[in-house]
Image (cartoon, rainbow, N blue to C red):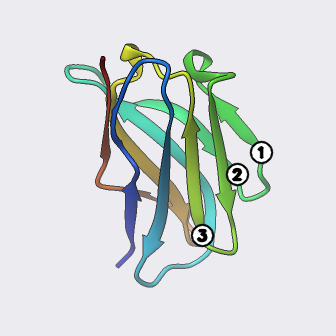
């Protein structure tokens, strides 16, 4: 059973930075695309950033030039460096990974990011 473990959220002031990380545990096959999504209260879960196994990236327009997604394939870990955080970035952030020959989608448990002074 594959589990994604995401961490790194917390409370930060506007303009501050946080770094999220996520890695799978358990037994798993090839990890394909990995990404981060976020969900604010009363809203749908939206894509923040995604990175392929070949390091191609895609970002939501709202986070371009502020957030950076990266991955360490040797550690099977994906990171999200978030700079210049704004109150509207406040949400639960979820890690996602496509794993195995069927590229099955797995989700982390979510980590809360709070941006407030």
Q: Counting other residues with Cα less than 10 Å from the Cα at mark 3, is it few (<14), some (14-19), or many (20 or more)?
A: some
In contact (CB < 8 Å): disc 2 and disc 1: yes
Indicate the secondary structure of the residue bearing disc 3.
loop
Task: Determine whether the residue tagged by mark 1 lies in a helix, strand or loop.
Answer: loop
Circle 1 residues within 10 Å: few <14, some 14–19, many ≥20: few
Secondary structure under badge 2? loop
Above-or-below relation of 15 to 10:
above
Q: Disc 3 marks which residue?
A: 76
Q: Which residue is mark 1?
A: 56
Q: Nearer the viewer, residue 41 or 113?
A: 113
- On the image, the x and y values in percent for residue 63 come to 58, 22
Q: Compared with residue 14, is residue 80 higher up or lower down, i.e. above or below? A: below
Percent x, y for residue 94? 38, 45
Identified at 58% across, 40% down, the residue is 81
In the displayed structure image, the side of residue 20 where residue 58 appears, left or right: right
Residue 84 in the figure: left or right of residue 86: right
For marks 2 and 1, give the CA distance: 5 Å
Q: Which is more N-terminal, label 3 or label 1?
A: 1
- Where is residue 25, by image quadrant? bottom left
Residue 52: numbered disc: 2
Please identify the residue farthest to the left as the structure is shown: 42
């Amino acid at each position: 059973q594959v589990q994604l473990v995401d961490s790194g959220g917390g409370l930060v002031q506007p303009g501050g930075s946080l770094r999220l990380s996520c890695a799978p545990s358990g037994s798993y096959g090839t990890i394909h695309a990995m990404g981060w999504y976020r969900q604010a209260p009363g809203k749908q879960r939206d894509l923040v950033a995604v990175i392929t196994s070949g390091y191609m990236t895609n970002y939501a327009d709202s986070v371009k030039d502020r957030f950076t997604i990266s991955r360490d394939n040797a550690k099977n870990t994906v990171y999200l460096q978030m700079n210049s955080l704004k109150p509207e970035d406040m949400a639960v952030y979820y890690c996602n990974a496509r794993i195995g020959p069927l590229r099955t989608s797995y989700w982390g448990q979510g980590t809360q990011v709070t941006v407030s002074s």
